[in-house]
Image: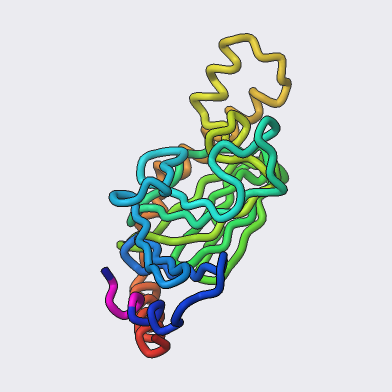
Amino acid sequence: MNSSIVKYLMSLGTLPEDLKVYFPDYSGTIYAKQGDTVSKHSAEESAEMFPFLNAGNVAHYLIGGPDSGPTNPSFGTAKIAITDAHHSFLPHAHGSKHFVLSQGNAGCVVFDRDTGKPKELALPARSLVVIPEKMSHSFFNKSGRPLTFFVANTGLGIYNEEYATTIDMARKQLVEGSNDPELVHLIHELESIGRYMQAHKPEKQESLKSRIAFLFHRLATVLEL
């Protein structure tokens, strides 16, 4: 356990009923305190961490759950997500609007329909990006350590079939005779992002400036705790 985080959480004393305090560390673990108890959530140790999209991504739900959707509705979903070091997501498009708050050296490649090309966006710590429904994109973590980020959407959990459409899913729908006229365009967009990611490997591009910034962020956390 991260002793400084545990010490901080214990210093809060007994919390009122139903109040909960979360604190992610820099190794891909989320600590939480409720009442007098400190719990630890990680991909290896917690049943409340759900893998999603592709290997290397896990999520802990705060609102809703992995099965949220039309048959199990919630007003929205919110989750703390963690992705592995130097890791990228499969290109995909969501069935609902997404709000993603970066907590580290992240980035996103979106397909810009105005230019007809992928566009790379840097997402440093504390930046928030709003991804419209059906916009093709891929997130990535540039850093050599797990990245924590906060994700909210308008009601779809990771198990819902509309949560995210990948290239393979779109191709399968086309083969099975889908009449969706946008499917061919979606496949083109996702393939374009895939080629961009393969050629540029943005998840590997951690700069010296970013490494130094991380050290200052970590020092600030130690001083605050």
- Quadrant showing the C terminus: bottom left
User: For residue 207, which quarter of the picture?
Assistant: bottom left
- Asked whether 224 falls inside the magenta stretch, the response is no
Instruction: Assess whether residue 3 is covered by the magenta stretch.
Output: yes
Q: Is residue 188 above or below residue 48?
A: above
Span of residues in magenta: 2-6
Quarter of the rendering occupied by the N terminus: bottom left
Question: What is the basis of the colouring in this image?
Answer: rainbow
- At 60% from the left and 36% from the top, the residue drawn is 163
Q: Report x, y in % for residue 223.
A: 38, 90
Q: Position of residue 205 (x, y in %)?
A: 37, 60
Q: Main secondary structure of the magenta part?
A: helix
Q: Position of residue 150 (x, y in %)?
A: 54, 60
Front residue of 134/201: it is 134
Q: At 61% across and 64% down in the image, what residue appears? A: 128
Residue 225 visible, this angle: yes
